[in-house]
Image (cartoon, rainbow, N blue to C red):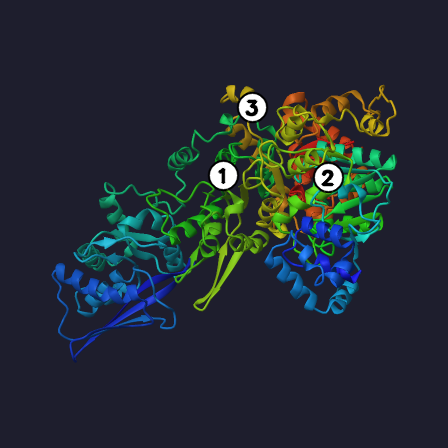
Amino acid sequence: MYSCVKTAILNGIEAIGVTVETDISEGMPVFDMVGYLSAEVKESRERVRTALKSKGYSLPVKRITVNLAPANVRKSGTGFDLPIAVSILASMGIVNSEIISEMMIVGELSLNGDVNGVNGILSMVISAKESGINICIVPEANYYEAKLIPDMNILPVNELNQVISFLENLEEIGNANEFMKNYDGCKDNLIKDNNVDGQYDLNKDVNEDNHDGLRDEAYDFANINGQKILRRACEVAISGMHNMLMVGPPGAGKSMIAKCIPSILPDLTVEEQIQISKIYSACGMFQERQGLMSHRPFRSPHHTISPYGLVGGGNVVKPGEISLANKGVLFLDELTEFNKATLEILRQPLEDKEVCISRVSGNYIFPADFILVAAMNPCNCGYYPDLTKCHCSERSLKNYRNKLSQPLLDRIDLCVQAQTVGFADLKRLGTGEPSKEIRTRVERMHEIQRRRYEGCDFRFNSQIPVSMLEKFCCLNEIEEKFMEQMYSKMNLTARTFHRVLRVARTIADMSGERDIKVIHLQEALCYRAMDKNFWGGDT
Amino acid sequence: MKYKYWLNNIEGLGNVAKRKIIELFGSAEGFYNDFERRIEEIDFLNNIQLENIKSARMENLNEKYKVFAEFGEGMVTIEDEEYPRNLLNVYDCPYGLYFLGNLPGEYDDMVAMVGARTCSSYGKLMAEEIASELAANGFVVVSGMAKGIDSASHWGCLNSGGRTIAVLGCGVDICYPAVNRNLYRRIIDNGCVISEFHHGSQPLPCQFPSRNRIISGMSNQLVVVEARKKSGSLITADFALEQGKDIYAVSGRITDSMSEGCNRLIDQGANIILSPKEFVASLTEFDLSTFVREKKPDKLDENERLIYDFIDYYPTSLEQILSDSQQDFFCVLSIINSLVDKGLIEEVFKNQYTKIN
C-alpha cells in the first residue's frame, strides 16, 4: 500500500520541501530506501525499524520501499526518521494516510521511540507555510522555534505513540483548527503558548529577559575609563554602521571595549529578527529561546578559524560566522593572527553584505550584513612606535605590516588608536557614560538615517553608494577646499576619500548638523584607514 | 692593475698577510713575477696559503681581470696614492677596496656617523642636523647606508650639498637595504660607495662588523647618534677607540632606551655633542660658545603653543594629548591639524604625533 508524508530539508538557511513515499508490497522481505541519501539518512532505516519495534509495531514481512523525492536533491540531516516511520505506519494502515499527506512532519527518532530535536525548524515551518501546509508535527525540543511562525498549527511531540494518538484524534475531529484549540487547552500546562492570536511572538517580558541576559552588566561603557577617542569612535561606528579597527598595545582595553559594543547596539526590527532567527535555527543555535532573536548578535571567532568557518561552507553547506553576525557585530580580536587567506575572503562580503557560496550541490546565498570590529597590536611585541619598549626589527615590522592587505584595510572606515589607561583614569572606575545613554543617541542616529534614506536601497551612512555621495555628503566651498588640500597631503585614494566623506556624514549627523563642516572632516580624517607608512615605510 | 686584482682575489690570504707581501715584494706585480724565485723569503705564510697562491698563479689573470673591468667598479689598493690615508693606520686594513663614484681627496676631513636603524625622530633630526652642519663646513660624512641614523646622516649631508661616503657590508653593486635605492644613486653622484667585498657579495651579517672598522678607520672622528645598550654602533665605537679616534655621542634622556648606548659612551669618556654647531666648530677650532638654537616655531597662537608643548620628539598619542591638555576633542583635533599643516608635527603612527623641525 502506498502512502506519502511531507517533510523538509535544510538547504543553506532556506528549507525545501521533500516528500517521503512508502510502498509496502508483496515480495522478498527487504527494507529499501532510495532518493540520493547521505549516510545519516541511510542509517535512519535502523532507527526507524527499532523505534517502531519498541513501540510495538513490527515491520511486516514484505517488501518495503521508501523514496525521498525530489530524487535529485542530496538528502542529509536527521529529520527524516519520524516522517519515514509515520509513512510506514500509514502504509501498514495504522494511521490515516489521507490526513498525513496534508501536514509536515519532522523529527529524529531514538531507538526507544522518543523524538529528538533537529536543526532549522524555523525555515522548515516557513517553507511549509509557503507551500500551503498549516499543520506541522515537530519535536517538542523545537516547539518554541516552530510556533514563532503565525497561523500555523504546531504539534509538539516527544515520542512516537504521541504522533499516532494525535493522528487518531485528528481523524475523529476532522478539522485541524478545531483540534488545535482543544489541543492547546490541554497542553497549556506543559508549554505556555503565545501563538493563539496569530501574531509573531514578541512578548515583551520575554524580550526584556533576553536583553538583560545578553547586555551584560559587566560590559558596560560606564566601566570604561578614559579612552575618550576610542569611546567616541565606537559611537560613530555604530551610529553609521561603519567598520572599525582598533590598534594599540596589549592591555589597552581593545577587547574590553569591543565586548561593550553590544550594549549600545539598537534594537532589531521584526524582519531582521526573523532573518537572524532563521540563520541561528539552521545552525542549531536556537536552543530554548522563547522568542525570535531579539538582540543583535555579537560574534567573536577565535583567530584559528578556517575560511569555511568564517564565510560558511562545508559538506552540508552551513552559514559561517559572518552570517551569524548578520545585522550585528563581527569582532576579530588579534586581526593579524588570522590566516591571511581567511581575512581576504572578507573583502567581498564587506562590500556586498551577503556571501554566495558555490558548491557542487548548488549555490547558497547567506546574508552577511555585519559591522566588522577588529583589534590588533601595532607590531609583534605590541609596543611600536614606542621605541623604549618595542624591540622589533625592521624586518619583523615589515612582515607584521604585510599580514594585512591594503584592500582590506581600505574597507575599514574607522581606524583608531587604543592607548593604555593611566592611573588617574583607572581610579575613576565606573564613572564613564553608561551604555544606555549612548544607545539612546545611537537609536536616534539610526532613526535619522532611516528617514533620510527612505526609498533608497541602503539604510546607513556607511552604505551610501558612490553615485549618491554627491547628494548626501555634499561639501560647501570651504570644506571642498580643505579636502582638496588633505587629499594630496594625506595621500588619500578615491576609496579612502569616499570613506572619509561617509564617516564625516555620520559625525555631522551626531552633532545635529545638516551640512558637513571642516571640523567633521577633521575628525573623520583622524579615523582614516591605517597607512602602511606608519610601520617605518619612510626614508 | 690586473696584478692587484689578482692578489686581492687570492683565497685564504688575510689583509695582514697581503700587507706583508707588499712590504716584501714592493707591489702585486712584483709578487706575481718573483713569487717562485723568492719563495724562501716568505716565512709568514703556511703551506695551504702557498698552495693557494700557486694555484691562483695558474689561472688566466687577463681573462679574470677583463670580467672585472666590465663591472665598471673602481678598485684601489694600499699601493695606490688614492687609498684613504687614515685607513692605512688600521693594522688589518683591507688590501683592496672596490668603489663606485669618486674617492675622497687626500686632504678631505672625514667624520663617521653611526647609529640605530630603528631610531626616534629625535635621533633622525639630530643626525640630519649634524650631517648638514658638517657638510656646510666641508667635511665628508662617512656612514653605512643602513636605515635610520645612517640614512639620515647621508641625506643631511647630501641635502646641504656635501659629499658623503657609504661603506657597505656587501658588494658595491648591491644596494642594501633596497629601500635606499634613491640614496645609493645620490651617494654615487656626490661621493662614493665603498666596500672591501667583491662584486656580487651578499650582505651577510658577519660582514658588517668588518665594515664598521672601515667606517671608523677612514675618518678622524666618530659620532654616535642613537644606540641601544647592545648596538652595532657600539662595535664601531670600539673600533674607533682601538684606532685612537675621537668619539662623540649625542646624549639622550636617561629613561630612553634608544640613547642608553650613547649615554654610556659619554660615561666612558666620549665627548658630548651639545649642539651640531658647537660640535662642528670644535672640529674647525672656531670658538662658538654663545650658541643658541635657531629654529623656534613662531607664529603660534596661545592654544597651538599649548598643544605643541604637549607633543614630544617621541610619539605622543592623541589620547595622551587630550587628557594632558584637558581641552575639547574637536578643539585639539583642529589645532593638531593646523600644526601638521605648518609642518611642526607629524603623524608617525595611527593617532600618534611627534615634533619635527
Host chain of mark 2? B
Residue at point 16%, 79% (across, down)? A26
Q: Cβ–Cβ below 8 Å for labels 3 and 1?
A: no
Q: Nearer the viewer, residue A62 or A344?
A: A344
Disc 2 from disc 3: Cα separation:
44 Å
Host chain of mark 1? A
- Determine crowd level at label 1: few under 14, some 14-19, many 20+ residues with C-alpha closer than 10 A: some
Kindly indicate whether the residues beneath marks 1 and 2 are on one polypeptide chain.
no
Residue B216, disc: 2
Residue position marked by numbered label 3 in the rendering: A422
Disc 1 from disc 2: Cα separation:
69 Å
Of the image marks 3 and 1, the number of the one nearer the N terminus: 1
Q: Cβ–Cβ below 8 Å for labels 1 and 2?
A: no
Q: What x and y, as percent, mark residue B135? A: 85, 37
Kindly indicate whether the residues beneath marks 2 and 3 are on one polypeptide chain.
no
Q: Is residue A55 above or below residue A90?
A: above
Host chain of mark 3? A
Q: Cβ–Cβ below 8 Å for labels 2 and 3?
A: no
Q: Nearer the viewer, residue B104 or B118?
A: B104
Q: What x and y, as percent, mark residue A17? A: 37, 64
Determine which quarter of the picture holds residue B165. Answer: top right
Residue A267, disc: 1
Q: What x and y, as percent, mark residue A106? A: 30, 58
Locate the N terminus of chain A and report the quarter of the image it occupies. Answer: bottom left
Q: Secondary structure at mark 3?
A: loop
Q: Is residue A232 left or right of residue A109?
A: right
Q: Secondary structure at mark 1?
A: loop
What amino acid is labelled 2 in the image?
Ser
